[in-house]
Image (cartoon, rainbow, N blue to C red):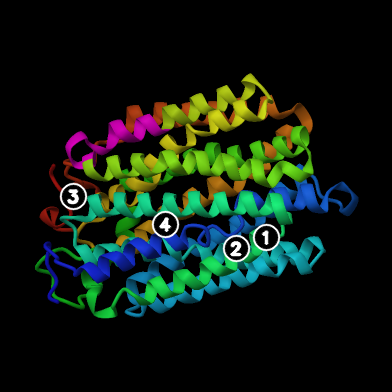
Amino acid sequence: MAAGPDRHPDARTLRGLDALNFFLADVRDGLGPYLAIYLIAVRGPDQGWNEATAGLIMTIAGVAGLIAQTPAGLLIDRTRAKRMVVVAAALAVTASCLALPFIASFTLVAATQSVAGIAGAIFPPALAAITLGVVGPKAFSRRIGRNEGFNHAGNAVSAALAGGLAYAFGPIVVFWLMGALAVCSVGAMLAVPARAIDDDLARGLAHGEKAGAAPSGLSTLLANRPLLLFALLCAIFHLSNAAMLTSVGQLLARVSGKAHATSLIAVCIVAAQCVMVPVAMFVGARADAIGRKPIFLAAFGVLAVRGVLYTGSDNPFWLVGVQLLDGIGAGIYGALFPVVVADLTRGGGRFNAAQGAVATAQGLGAALSATFAGLIIVSAGYDAAFLALAATAALGFVLYLTLMPETRDATVADARAGTDPEAVRPRAA
C-alpha cells in the first residue's frame, strides 16, 4: 500500500493487533511486581533477599533496559522486519524469566533480569510503529487507545489467572503462565501481515515524503525543547509510579503472610487493569477533542493522591481499593505517551528513535524508583516511602502545568531546527 494519511487495514489485521496487545501485555514487562514478591516471599532473608536487594535487582534490570531504549527505537525505525523483532524480544524476555527458579546467586538473577529489560525495550516503539504503519496518523490516537485497552485487559486476565493459580499451586505458576502467553503473543504477531505495515509511515515520515527517504538526524531531537521537557516529565512520572505497586506488594507480603502475597498483588493488578481499559479507550477517543495537557495533568494529580492514600491503612482491602487509582494514572499515561511523541516529531522520520530517547528518560526514572523507595522503606518505613513518591508526582504536576505546551495544536517547528514547519505541525483536533 502506498504511504498516506488514510489507511484502510482489513479486519484480520486489526484483530491481530488486538490479540497482540492482549497476549503481549504480561510478557512485555517480564515478571514486574511478581519479581519482588518472589525474591522476598519465596527466597526470603534466609537467602539474603529483602526490600533493598530486590529493589537493587530491579534497578539493575531497569538501567539495562533504559540503555537499550534509544538503540531499540533506532532499530525499529530502520528495520522492515518489525514482526520478527517483536517475536525475538518476546522469546528472550520469557526465557530470561523462566530461568529464575533455577538460579540462586545475585549475579545470575541480575543478569537474567537485565536480558529481560533489554529485550523489553523493543516492545513500546515496535507496537507503536506497527500501529502507525497499519492505520496511519489520522487514526493513530484512537487506535493507540484501543491498543492500551486490550493491553490492560490482557494484564487483568493474566493477573487473575496468576492469582487464582498461585493460591492453588504456589508462586511458581507465574513463570509457566508467562511461557504460555509468550506462545500466544508470537501467534498474534504473525497474524498481522508484513504487507499491511507501511514502514515509511511507521517511522513518522509525513505524507508526500519520498518512500525510503533518509530520516532526519538525531541532532534534531536534541534541538526539540518540548520533547526534552516531555522526557523529563516522563522520568518524574515513573520515578513516582514505578515503585508504588512493588512497594504495596512487599507490604502485603509483610502483613498478610507469604502464602497470600502473590494472590493479593494479583488482585491489585486486576483491579487497576479493569479501570485502565475504559480509561485508555476514553483517552484514545477524546484526546484530540480535549487536548493532551489537561488529561496528562489528571494522570499526575491522581498519582500524587494515590501515594498519600496508601498511608491510610495497612488493611489489604484498603490497599487494593487505593490501587484502583493506578488504573486512571497509568491508563492515561499509556494511551497518551506515543501520541505526544508523535505530535512532537511528525514528519521527521524519527518517531521511534524519539520514543526510544524519551523512554530512556522514563526508564531512568523507573529504575531509580525501586531503589529510592526500597532505601526509604528500610530506613524510615512504608508510609515515608509512599509520601516521598506522592511528593515526586506533585512536582511533576506543577512542572507540566507551568512549562509543557499543549501538543495537540501547537506548532513545534521552531523547536526543530532545520525542519519544514508544515512537516512537523501536530494534528489539529
User: Is 394 placed left or right of 346 in the picture?
Assistant: right
Q: Are marks 4 and 1 in contact (CB under 8 Å)?
A: no
- Residue at image position (49%, 52%) is 157
Disc nearest the viewer among 1 and 3: 1
Few, some or many C-alpha atoms within 10 Å of disc 4 (few <14, some 14-19, many ≥20)?
many
Residue 112 quadrant: bottom right
Under mark 3, the amino acid is: Ala
Residue with the mark numbered 2: 177
Q: Residue at x 31, y 34 (%)?
A: 295
> SS for tag 2?
helix
Residue position for label 1: 173
Pointer 4 or 1: first along the chain:
1
Q: What residue did someone put label 4 on?
A: 357
Of residues 353 and 294, the one drawn nearer to the viewer in this rendering: 294
Q: Which mark is residue 413?
A: 3
> Marks 1 and 3, how far apart in space?
51 Å
Residue farthest along the top direction in this orientation:
312
Identified by mark 4, the residue type is Ala
Q: Which residues are drawn in magenta?
A: 286-299
**Secondary structure under the numbered disc 3 in the rendered image:** helix
Q: Observer-nearest residue: 116 or 420?
A: 116
Q: Is residue 289 located in the magenta-colored stretch of the structure? A: yes
* Kind of element beneath mark 4: helix
In this rendering, is residue 139 above or below 180?
above
Residue 12 percent across, percent down from the top left: 25, 71
Amino acid residing under circle 2:
Leu
Residue plotted at (37% across, 30% down): 298
Packing grade of label 2 (10 A; few <14, some 14-19, many >=20) is: some
Q: Nearer the viewer, mark 4 or mark 1?
A: 1
- Single out the mark in the foreground, 2 or 4: 2
336 in the magenta segment: no
